[in-house]
Image (tube, grey):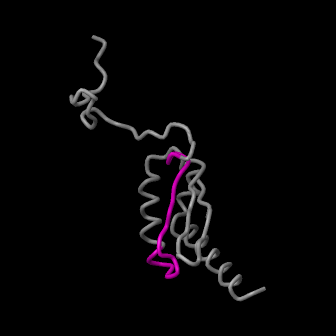
Amino acid sequence: MSTETQDGDDLEERVTNFLRRNFPQIQMHGGSAAIQDIDRETGEVTIALGGACSGCGISPMTIQAIKSRMVKEIPEIEQVHAHTGMDGMGGGGGMSPSFPGETVDDDGEEDEGPQAPF
């Protein structure tokens, strides 16, 4: 086994351990985090969050935390790409929830939410 392969295996193991150690709530809440790709030359890693993460409203914050903390903790990692099944990857839904007053209709008027039936 070459040194490069051993180093690569070590990097993958450190990324996996980072996810387990820093984000146990992913698994505790029925989600999963898997390494999709590690490019050792560019220092880029791609992480896919699945399971319950695919519809979770907190997953964007989890993704941001993974991105910012991994590059600080693992020196070889320069950039992290992370996504859930909801990020335009063919998952169901894919729309962010909106609340009254947060959106503007096509005619330029604010959305005031559904009208009461009475």
Q: Quadrant of the C terminus?
A: top left
**Where residue 26 appears, x then y in whole percent?**
55, 57
Residue found farthest to the top: 118
Q: Position of residue 101 (x, y in %)?
A: 24, 34
Nearer-the-camera pick, 79 or 10 = 79
Query: Outermost residue, bottom direction?
Result: 3
Give the residue displayed 55% in from the left and 38% down from the top: 92
Compared with 46, 12 (above or below) is below
- The furthest residue to the left: 109
* Residue appearing at x 62%, y 62% in the figure: 36
In this rendering, would 43 be left or right of 12?
Answer: left
**Where's residue 91, x and y in %?**
56, 42
- Assess whether residue 1 is covered by the magenta stretch: no
Hey, which quadrant is residue 6 in on the image?
bottom right
Q: Quadrant of residue 5?
A: bottom right
Asked if residue 2 is positioned above or below residue 22 in the image, the reply reads: below
The residue lying at 58 percent from left, 67 percent from top is 20
Say above or below: 87 vs 68: above
Region of the chain picked out in magenta, as a range: 71-88
Q: Residue furthest front?
A: 41
Spot occupied by residue 77 in the image (x, y as percentages of width and height): 51, 76
State the residue in front, 63 or 3.
3
Q: How many marks?
A: 0
Q: Which of 75/52 is in front?
A: 75
Considering the image in quadrants, where does the N terminus appear? bottom right
